[in-house]
Image: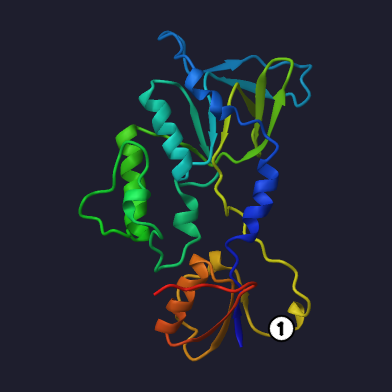
Amino acid sequence: MECLYLDAELSKEKEEEEDAQPRQLHRLLPHLQPPPTSAPSLSKLSTSATTLRQRLRVYVNGPIIVGAGPSGLATAACLQLLHLPFLLLEKESCIASLWHQRTYDRLKLHLPKAFCSLPFMPFPAHFPDYPTRDQFLAYLDAYCRHFHLRPRFGQCVESATFDHVTGLWHVSIMGAEFEYLCRWVVVATGENAVPDLPELPGREAFKGNVVHSVCYKNGEGLRGKEVLVVGCGNSGMEVCLDLCEHGAKPFMVVRNGVSVSR
């Protein structure tokens, strides 16, 4: 049996635990005041020889948004409409990197488009009720152009530490010789950004392939093979259907009982 391990939910619990600690300063955003027109949005502060990391400090006159997926883009657009400065950081080279790099070919939105559009810009009327992955990515590209959003790509946030003395966040970028200083940090890194493959007893003796759903593209190459799908969330159900349509023989195991409506 070829084993395809699907897990779209386990990483969510881990990330919720990690994200429970940072202060949710994004709630203060409505109280931000726009800077004077003569003040730049970013100003370099001098390097201090006594600082712990000997880094150049760059002050951001507004929130730092970590992640240029749908949530990060929506937050940035709302700030843009209020004429408030911000800095949008993305570790990958594109927006919505999970949708670009870690999705299967047949993926569509799991809710009607009326419930999935970002603020102040609905989906095009000619899009189907359940847009495809490529249509959703085209929509996000258009959203960026419409609101003039320019993420800084290739900037992976390494840490964000709050200084209670100065009231500022110190945001470090992996591999950079500088750090950002700001008053607000918005974490928009997604629910399932990090795949989680638990250690299963006997897994090392299994001679088939063990694949996480983020690596699955389609069922080509699995025709006639038996595939075990672990989990029956949206991705598990869709991948099972895709395997059937490609002539594979999928089996599904779930932790608890499942109710399927027709």
Rate crowding at label 1 as few (under 14), some (14 to 19) or many (20 or more) other CA atoms within 10 Å.
few
Residue at figure coordinates x 66%, y 61% from the top left: 196
In this view, the residue in front, 179 or 83, is 83
> Does 46 sit above or below residue 212?
above
Residue 219 visible, this orientation: no
Whole-percent x, y for residue 85 in the image: 46, 22
List the single residue furthest toward the bottom.
224
Residue at figure coordinates x 36%, y 49% from the top left: 115
The mark total stands at 1
Residue at figure coordinates x 36%, y 26% from the top left: 81
Whole-percent x, y for residue 204 in the image: 76, 78
> Does 184 sit above or below residue 21?
above
Judged left or right of residue 52, residue 138 is: left
> Does 97 sit above or below residue 52?
below
> Does 91 sit above or below residue 177?
below
Q: Quadrant of residue 38?
A: top left
SS of the residue at dot 1? loop
Whole-percent x, y for residue 136 in the image: 35, 53
Whole-percent x, y for residue 152 in the image: 49, 36
Residue at figure coordinates x 36%, y 39% from the top left: 144
Residue position for label 1: 206
Q: How is the image coloured?
A: rainbow
What amino acid is labelled 1 in the image? Answer: Phe
In this view, the residue in front, 12 or 259, is 259
Q: Quadrant of residue 79?
A: top left
Residue 234 visible, this orientation: yes
Q: For the C terminus, which image quadrant?
A: bottom left
List the single residue furthest toward the left.
126
